[in-house]
Image (cartoon, coloured by chain):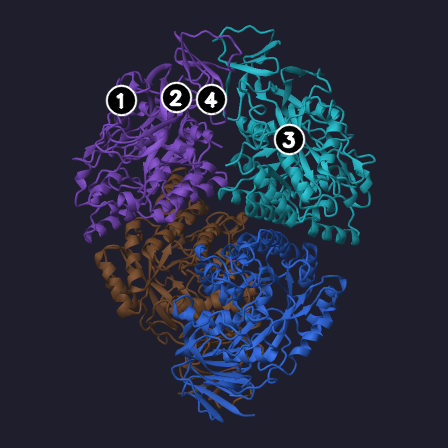
Chain colours: A brown, B purple, C cyan, D blue
Amino acid sequence: MSTTLISGGTVVTAEGASVMDVLIDGERIVALLAPGSVPVTADATIDATGKYVIPGGVDVHTHMELPFGGTNASDTFETGTIAAAWGGTTTIVDFAVQRTGERVQDGLDAWHAKADGNCAIDYGFHMILGGIDDDSLKAMDSLVAHEGITSFKLFMAYPGVFYSDDGQILRAMQQAAANGATIMMHAENGTAIDVLVAQALARGESDPVNHGITRPVAMEEEATFRAIKLAEVAGAPLYIVHMSARQAVERVAEARNAGANVFGETCPQYLYLNLEDHLGAPGFEGAKYVCSTPLRSKHEHHQKDLWRFLRTNDLQVVSTDHCPFCFKEQKELGVGNFSAIPNGIGSVEHRMDLLFQGVVDGELSLSRWVETCSTTPARMFGLYPRKGTLVPGADADVVIYDPNATTTIGVETHHMNLDYSAYEGTTVQGGVDTVLSRGTVIKRGNEFIGRAGHGRYLRRDLSGYLL
Amino acid sequence: MSTTLISGGTVVTAEGASVMDVLIDGERIVALLAPGSVPVTADATIDATGKYVIPGGVDVHTHMELPFGGTNASDTFETGTIAAAWGGTTTIVDFAVQRTGERVQDGLDAWHAKADGNCAIDYGFHMILGGIDDDSLKAMDSLVAHEGITSFKLFMAYPGVFYSDDGQILRAMQQAAANGATIMMHAENGTAIDVLVAQALARGESDPVNHGITRPVAMEEEATFRAIKLAEVAGAPLYIVHMSARQAVERVAEARNAGANVFGETCPQYLYLNLEDHLGAPGFEGAKYVCSTPLRSKHEHHQKDLWRFLRTNDLQVVSTDHCPFCFKEQKELGVGNFSAIPNGIGSVEHRMDLLFQGVVDGELSLSRWVETCSTTPARMFGLYPRKGTLVPGADADVVIYDPNATTTIGVETHHMNLDYSAYEGTTVQGGVDTVLSRGTVIKRGNEFIGRAGHGRYLRRDLSGYLL
Amino acid sequence: MSTTLISGGTVVTAEGASVMDVLIDGERIVALLAPGSVPVTADATIDATGKYVIPGGVDVHTHMELPFGGTNASDTFETGTIAAAWGGTTTIVDFAVQRTGERVQDGLDAWHAKADGNCAIDYGFHMILGGIDDDSLKAMDSLVAHEGITSFKLFMAYPGVFYSDDGQILRAMQQAAANGATIMMHAENGTAIDVLVAQALARGESDPVNHGITRPVAMEEEATFRAIKLAEVAGAPLYIVHMSARQAVERVAEARNAGANVFGETCPQYLYLNLEDHLGAPGFEGAKYVCSTPLRSKHEHHQKDLWRFLRTNDLQVVSTDHCPFCFKEQKELGVGNFSAIPNGIGSVEHRMDLLFQGVVDGELSLSRWVETCSTTPARMFGLYPRKGTLVPGADADVVIYDPNATTTIGVETHHMNLDYSAYEGTTVQGGVDTVLSRGTVIKRGNEFIGRAGHGRYLRRDLSGYLL
Amino acid sequence: MSTTLISGGTVVTAEGASVMDVLIDGERIVALLAPGSVPVTADATIDATGKYVIPGGVDVHTHMELPFGGTNASDTFETGTIAAAWGGTTTIVDFAVQRTGERVQDGLDAWHAKADGNCAIDYGFHMILGGIDDDSLKAMDSLVAHEGITSFKLFMAYPGVFYSDDGQILRAMQQAAANGATIMMHAENGTAIDVLVAQALARGESDPVNHGITRPVAMEEEATFRAIKLAEVAGAPLYIVHMSARQAVERVAEARNAGANVFGETCPQYLYLNLEDHLGAPGFEGAKYVCSTPLRSKHEHHQKDLWRFLRTNDLQVVSTDHCPFCFKEQKELGVGNFSAIPNGIGSVEHRMDLLFQGVVDGELSLSRWVETCSTTPARMFGLYPRKGTLVPGADADVVIYDPNATTTIGVETHHMNLDYSAYEGTTVQGGVDTVLSRGTVIKRGNEFIGRAGHGRYLRRDLSGYLL
């Protein structure tokens, strides 16, 4: 096996930052070294002087090839993981889907079939449970025990599609409490929201902005609180996905202060985009920004507070909820009916850059950037210390990040299979220089030199982030 | 019309207490007088010296003859209102029921048929909506406009019986926001509770105490918060019935501090009885105490806090949720299966006495006793100032209350049609001396001298208690 | 003694509103009557049809002739109480002052000397304790027992003048806990504020607006919380005067929810005037608006929240903190040095009108207007039911208020001895029609027909507003 | 320079735990290595198989030789640092003292004189400011710039000794805001407490337990909140020392949720000892447990909550507040007068063991043990990454901790200069095996092989723990 030495860079972890050399042997990191202190020979040396050396990004919320709203998310596991690699993300955890009426194992098998041999970086799966019953509850135990799937996502939204009622949710949480898994929740009151949606459409309010208007903050806050209370009854860990409303995060904070294993995730779109300017863009343009939970009003200081919650660890994780649909033909399914617009924004490629801009802007510390984008996601979902950190023994998923670069985001330059960018023309400071996945350089400068099939399926342990 | 002078008593209202004479002409109070200051002749004089003169009690939560669990609440409108009168309550607001699939107006007509000509005191109706759809929503407007019914009760509990889902609740709340009505809510997460009930029964845990154990505090708190948030979206006033868990009331307090029209009611059973000693009594004895929300644990200081919430006006109303089922044949339906025990406790006769004991114990002021048991219920449900106060122009519903009497509660002495008492053997200080309903003495000393049929149906206005 | 009948008006009390006649015999109300129901002859009849009949206003925070900052408040007890009467206020409670080093009784005697024979309406005294020591603590007991003074004001502001340290405050609170008195608190951290003031002056920031800038919200919130905690240790009731910052009121609300006897008062200036437009007016104009606590920034929604707190009873009382200083010669003492501007705004004449505008604007209900301006102040400070309500037996302090009048406020028309008005040119809807003090008409239409010396000293009981 | 390899142990850091080898060259760690992956030769090898390898403990709150109450803390820098080393603590930050009236630099010089050449481990100083004035404020800047002292402690307790008033506190905080230092606060309302103390003594309540009774929870909570608000006005970071009352920590949590740089520290005595059993021990025995803030009542679940706050990072640091006074002659100064008992408990030797027991008991995770006892203290006070972590480049302060050992605490076996132990007879699981300070083994098995004078003064940077 060949060895690589990354020398002279500032190694940034969740704990701190200092100049160290990183020695890689084959697929793993084998040593951290004070520069010049221990004589080391390596087959290759990468000079990282003046740059940050960070654990590769871990994006725990992606939806490659997801069938939704009569179409499929536009990134395959191949295009999506290559785009992720370009952006400094070296692990994704995607959502396998059990559709209502389907066997859980069948849903999982279908997901393996999509991903197997196609990924450029390592990947794991959460399992969406679209039909809670005795069989799927048993399947949860089996997935935890045998498949390395230790987290299950339920939906309080989308009645008739992924929706579980509170009794089903409680049962799944009880199962998780027993087998150690974590419940992930899409927390919006879909039953109430569907009434608001139907009423808006009946009034002829069909533009994309109505997607946001019919999903009020109070319905995210309510569902978040409900999930917390159900988890309290069941005794299960709970992770709320894609939080956008500060009031909802305050409920997470309240539970956490009381000592509950409740966690929250936000996404770049909630930190940068808003209801008025983006979802409310003229014409059908707003369709590009349709996702759920929706973008929130710029007049209610959600973004300022979300950044704060990231600092105070009331939010622990930044993922993308990457779920791209092209504007042409896909988003356009909802012309004249906002509720038919496929939900999702694609940004698996841009998370590390967009969040580094938060460092530049003084919103996050360097360590907190790494912690929210890499370390905590890995710990939360049982991948640590294999992923999410730079310690001897860990997989050599390493990103060399250049704080002096600048990155301009747009459809011309991005690598996602997506015909628009939600951040078109945005320039941020910093840029991904070099990316290693399990010891192999897969991206260097302006060149992708990895390959589909390099990425391996990750059997995950139980969460390592519980109180 | 004949005149009556109640002289020399201490008139207690929600605002204060002072010695005044009360002059009644026919059915109404026509004057409050400083004793000896204005020469008045009256056909009859009642000497109230040394006693309290208070507005008759207003019990806004009774269920006479309610069909529930395959049987009927054991008090008819006749027996129930006579018992109420004995206990100093001169107005009840009972719940007419629209069963699922039934027309609202038909349910109301059925209730009128039960009550008409049978009541010893005045009565009004709320309407339980067991099936929210376009028709019943329209019926709400009609009841508000034409029937004097301005409050509608929904259930988050009892799936398959009275249960409404969140979309139905939202629609009813929107209707109420438009027509000015108040939504009353049974706030327990019935969908989750039914899972816990089924699991307990499957484990062979069938004793009455399991009724309480399977309805955890968190599920009352959750549903309370959910109702508050749905009401926030709809813009409707919300009144949470029979609150027993301090955590749930804290959610009401939180909403009220924020300026919302959210209100809470508790009942004597939650102030005096508990899960361990009563619901957990040996054998099947606990069945006597099965009601929903359930009695709570004595180890969690709910009672201490409920009294405090009454003092601080975080709870505004004390009602009984009077829903009596005899132990023999009725409660016994649930031998071997707690979930088949009819839910309810009968105490329409004892509310004023049990709460006066709170005054004796220093938990409530005299004025607050009157306010929570009479004035606020009347204002909350559009009966004020006709009921709930003693001012010229008001109905002469007057109770002369003797603070020096003592009252012992028990099945031998009570007047409810109920073969047991939840307060058997309890002695409280104070007692109802004389009761007038619309100017007529209907109870004097140990004698009931009213009659079924004296009571009239009350068309109620919109709530007079909104911010 | 002569009798007066006020007929046909809508009697508004803290509890409700209905059309009633009010019969007065001599100095007292002797009957409330349903119109036309009881034959009554009276020496005089006042037709109040179409108008509100309310208990006279009770202003529990005035400073007539107060020596402060080297000058005296410009209203004497004569001019001040006549102005109060013009504005519908029939009772004031003024602050007698024990200066540091002075005997308490001497300070009280001096206040009686100023007021005796000079007041147009009834008046009581609180006592400011400027020097807590063994003697003044004993004097507290004596004032409660013999002088009808049951409330004592302390200052956390103004070191070197009225300031008490936390040990002194605790001792006074312990004394109050024992003798039943209420502690009133000026809650601002004066020690810290004086540092900010000195620093601002040293930087040459001498304009009036700096008065507000150097008294930050956090220092009102802090002192409020400190007073609450000291009162918790001592077990004494606590009343925070002139609250202007919403954060401070939130601390009061928090304590009240926990069941503490903690109360809060605000004043019209905090509901209508702000830091930028008024205190920050060009030139020296802002001096007109210098008072402590200061006016707050219009950008922090204090006013919106103060109105809400009045609705939710987190604030209980509206007083004026009437402390007028003329612009010429008095306010001008602070030209070039904001800290030398005498603190105070005069509005004893306008409170009832300014708050009725809150009713017009939908901020307060009619009953809540009466409750905050009359009933609760009377109950809070031991004057109820003699003052603050309209019941037989009460003093006949009655205001007939015309909701259809309009009132324009300004120096040309007001009756206070003050050469400017903080509300110059403001027109509000509603106006005081007729005012009776203890049965005597003292103001009718545009005529004052009372007299200095009519007002009597009120010996007050202990607070009737405690939980 | 010689090299040492610590092999085969489980390296535990604040971030995680995994088996690694640690290579030391001279005084520094130079490499972390995956075992067996890189050929390394070392002069010495320590086999840590089956044991934890952790960064040496950092105790940021000690008082060696502190003059207090007419006597001196009984540990010298020599005895105290040797005891610390025995217990796995390799860095202390002690409090140099500026007494009132003394020059700051003189106080610092005196402290250097005590410590220089006498310490067995590395040490830094905070500075207690006992007299805030223009000179001492300037001295703060100088200490930050030139002396490596970046934290300053103020007292809201002890009027007449260390006490600063709120104006002085504000000025010091402003200075800190400007120069980047952190303000440390003893948060108890000493002015009020002194009243309670004098009253207790006057009532003849002189036993040690009265020390706790006269320092009520509310006075810790109050002072904590006051400090937070003063820091908000000044814009300075704030660190509250030795917190014992859950209500006070809740104020810290509230400020932290709002994004403030407010931090809290607790100590082992508050996690294990209580008012009734220890401070209230019979006779004068309780004197052993006199410290401030005092031990709290076991009936108010402070300890349960303090552990929770450590888990949720509402408390960040565990220190000892090591301030030992012998029972004989020192504690005995307070026979007959609890207020004359020197305040302090000695436990510098036991912190790591007592907190590891928290790991054993399931209160803390392994990583959180290291984080609260070593990493965060180092980051908080500008010693990271030199101290508090195990990374290449860091000082080789390493503890090998044996989780299978047991440690019994008592005066016969401890190494502090103290004639009693507050934990006499307590046995905890786990024990310190080997201790290295800057690469030198100073404790091995039952042998101390370090020396006074090995320890060096640490010039500290500004805090690395700010948001």
Any mark on residue B399, and which? 2
Any mark on residue C146, and which? 3
- Measure how far apart labels 4 and 3 are at the Cα level: 27 Å
Tell me, yes or no, whether the two marked residues, 2 and 3, touch with CB atoms within 8 Å: no
Q: Nearer the viewer, mark 1 or mark 3?
A: 3
The quarter of the picture where the N terminus of chain B appears is top left
To the question of a shared chain for discs 1 and 2, the answer is yes
Label 3 neighbour load within 10 Å: few <14, some 14-19, many 20+: few
Q: Nearer the viewer, mark 4 or mark 3?
A: 3
Amino acid type at circle 3 is His
The chain to which mark 2 is attached is B
To the question of a shared chain for discs 2 and 4, the answer is yes
The quarter holding residue C136 reads top right
The quarter holding residue A70 reads bottom left
Residue A68 in sight in this render? no
Task: Tell which circle, 2 or 4, labels the residue nearer the N-terminal end.
Answer: 4
To the question of a shared chain for discs 2 and 3, the answer is no
Q: Circle 4 sits on which residue?
A: B10
- Measure how far apart labels 1 and 4 are at the Cα level: 34 Å
Label 1 neighbour load within 10 Å: few <14, some 14-19, many 20+: many
- Measure how far apart labels 1 and 3 are at the Cα level: 59 Å
